[in-house]
Image (cartoon, rainbow, N blue to C red):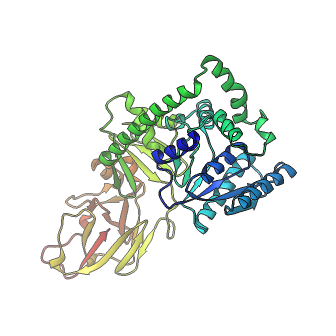
Amino acid sequence: MQVTQKQFHDFMKHQKLVAKGEKVLLAVSGGLDSMVMAHLFLKSEISFGIAHCNFGLRGEASDGDERFVQSWAEAHQVPYHGKRVDLKGGSVQLAARDARYEWFNELRQKHPYDKVATAHHLNDSLETFLINLTRGTGIRGLTGIQAVSGHIIRPMLFLTRTEIGSYASEHSLQWREDASNKKLTYDRNLIRHRVIPELERLNPSLLSTFIHTSERLKATDWLLKEKVKEIKNNYLSEESTMKRLNMEWVKGEEDQLLLSELLTDFGFNYVVSKTIFQVRGVPGKKFFSKDWEVSTDRHDLFLKQRVPQPKEEGDTFRIFEKGVLSLEGKEVLVEEVSGERVQFGDPNVAFFDLSRLTFPLEIRKWKEGDRFRPLGMQGTKKVSDFLVDEKVPLALKDQVYVLVSDDRIAWVIGYRTSEDFKLQTGQNERILRVELR
């Protein structure tokens, strides 16, 4: 077996890119890199097909690429899939990438293919590292291109551009040249043709150095993710309609990095995460990502998904009769029960003297100015003051509901019922049970 082919086989096996019997769809542009990849697969025992996307960006040259790839596939009796795409608006490069991968995924599911292979190589990985470094990134962005990303595999990452060229010459391979690869208006081309040659003047072994650095960064990234996973398992919990992150795990300023990595999953970048870390313990601070809201409290962070909640007549839900009401992802069960069913102790269950209630009952979020007579008290109290006394975090206050009968609060749900509607010992002919579940 030729040296490069053996390296290809070993790399595939070591990275576990393709399991026995799996079928691979190759993304082939017709350029040097993808044609070498196609040849390596041709010499392997792996079943594969070819996919080529023609965006028509270079006119006749693009059509020539398409004909070239299709002819190669037919000559070697390899299944061929071709598609022409008209790009509309935005960044041409991003639009082309998105359209290409969307189509690859459609092909993978339709035919079916188990994996999609692209011809990214070691130089591409170094270029990605430098682009991410320039734009700003986390540790993962400095590890270069990954060999596996979901169903996408990159079986050429062990090869340099020079080694790919040598392999093509050795096997007399043909390919198509893309003139746009030399245009310095693209960031990647600028780094490829101007930046990297200068860096190689400083360090002729730049690619080897990058390989070792990338390996260390990948290990660091893995350790960081394991630590974040541990924090999530021990300190992140579900709390009502949100998540509560207890911050007791924070020991020093270096833990800012861990919080940043944790909040990445919720769409917060490093700068915002740094600010959140600095104001931890200060109640009432709020921060927003595209889909999440973080609010701070004394010992916790609360994360609430920013999803429009179903409303009924504003913020009010009416209960016209006994039964089950859907309330923002939860259920409210309303039923009449006998005395034997009365059992106190669950904050999400309340019992009332039905004769004192007036239907329809209402459930709504509490509001400023609301007052009620907490069970066991003689006078009334503002709900806002009651929640402060109960040490309800600011973030959870926004999620507190009240059960209302004839404009009077019968229950601050989950916390305290009202003295005005309590059961009377030995005098309750009818009992209403309300449960939030």
Q: Judge left or right: residue 291 versus residue 252.
A: right
Relative to 109, residue 16 above or below: above
Give me the residue at 63% from left, 37% from top. Answer: 124
Relative to 131, residue 80 above or below: below
Give me the residue at 36% from left, 49% from top. Answer: 244
Residue 302: image location, x then y, percent: 40, 47
Residue 390: image location, x then y, percent: 27, 50
Query: Nearest the camera: 124 or 7?
Result: 7
Relative to 57, residue 325 above or below: below
Give me the residue at 51% from left, 66% from top. Answer: 314
Q: Is residue 134 visible?
A: yes
Q: How many marks?
A: 0
Query: Nearest the camera: 71 or 195?
Result: 71
Relative to 433, residue 27 above or below: above
Residue 217: image location, x then y, percent: 47, 32
Residue at the far left in the pictured view: 426
Query: Nearest the camera: 378 or 106?
Result: 106
